[in-house]
Amino acid sequence: MTDPKSISIQDYSYLLPSGRIAVHPLPERDASKLLVYKNGEIRQDVYQNIAEYIPGQALLIFNDTKVIKARIRFQKSSGGTIEVFCLEPYDAINEYSSVMCKKGSVKWKCMIGGVGKWKEGKLTMELTVGGLLWAISARLIEKLSDAFVVEFSWAPANLGFAEVLEKFGDIPLPPYIKRKAEKEDTERYQTIYASEEGSVAAPTAGLHFTETVFSSLAKKNINTNFVTLHVGAGTFKPVKAATMKHHEMHAEWIDANKKFIENLIAQLDKTIIAVGTTSLRTLESLFWMGVKASINPQIKELNISQWEVYEEPLLNTCFSTKESLTALLNWLVNNKQERLFTQSQILIAPGYRFKVANAIITNFHQPQSTLLLLVAAAIGNEWHKVYEYALQND
């Protein structure tokens, strides 16, 4: 078995001309070209016809996270701009919705563009909403190894943080989209089923799904279910280390309720398809969390770190997917919890053996990225053929 730690990221590179990256979405979400890879064969179609390639009775798992307007640009009196990008809450949390509803002030872990220009204590921005003056201020609290801690405060203080971001923030487009956010991005860089606020990047595979596509899935009795993984900016983090053992994977928040896990257990005999890398990482993380609960039913934290699924004691355990997910369900019951809210740092790379998902619907990924490693874990060296075909056929 390939040791993921020894992987050289140079082996997962390809030539990607900038002109092959769509800067704007197509007018119709489901008009995008579709490449279908199965058993070494490649076919092409359009997204609107995706149901034709999915077995009847299959189960599609979607990530229903919602992108927040996480990018706030403060204008200095001197005319310069300082951009504060909200990554994730800094204080301990037990659910995202309470953070997004928090009133008055909140601390977040942030990236800052132009931090060297941040000389004054507070940055402030004002605007008038419905005849009322709204204001948001940012204060730099602490420098971390990979980010900064920023305290936001605002007025009126009875507003929730989500309301404040909605007015003062911009949709954070991926770094490979070389343009400023526009009005249409508020709607188009969001899946039509997004509901749980907390992501700073969209689960992009889901962007192509329309009511028409969902209708075609229903006609084939293809089931759908929704789980939440809040996508962090780390999903775009480039791999700068020569080998993967020196790369630190980003952690992301998973939110899965008991009903979701029960439904998953009931349909394990179906073809389970993850819509997007975030859904896939969530499904696989839930399996390993169940293994941890099986090994130690008294365990208090079920988070998954970067390498532990490749190491003892998890590596050579022989739990079936049903046994593992049932143990996870029992753990929730025993701990009187209706939902699992925890972090996963799982790195899925060649050498990984999938436990829950049978297929993935995903967009194409950047060279030398952890997302490309995930695709290679699924189809091996055939990823070269798939990506070459995609580039040659637009």
Image (spheres, rainbow, N blue to C red):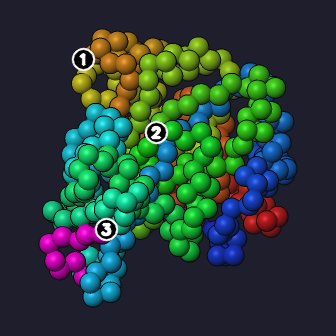
Helix, strand or loop status at disc 1: loop
Type of amino acid under label 2: Glu
Residue labelled with disc 2: 196
Going 23% across and 71% down the picture, which residue do you hit?
123
Residue depth check, mark 3 versus mark 2: number of the one nearer the observer = 3
Name the residue tied to disc 1: 298
Q: Is residue 204 left or right of residue 82?
A: right
Q: What is the x, y in percent for residue 394?
A: 79, 65
Mark 1 surroundings: few (<14), some (14-19) or many (≥20) residues within 10 A = few
Mark 3–mark 2 distance (CA, rounded to whole Å): 27 Å
Seen at 49% across and 45% down, the residue is: 66
As drawn, 312 above or below 44? above
- Amino acid carrying mark 3 in the image: Glu
User: Please, what is the three-letter code of the amino acid marked with disc 1?
Assistant: Gln
What residue is shown at x 73% (from left), y 38% (from top)?
211
Percent across and percent down for residue 148 are 24, 63
Distance between the alpha carbons at the discs numbered 2 and 1: 30 Å
Distance, label 1 to label 3, CA atoms, is: 50 Å
Q: Which residues are magenta?
A: 117-125
Q: Is residue 223 above or below residue 278?
A: above
Q: Residue 126's mark?
A: 3
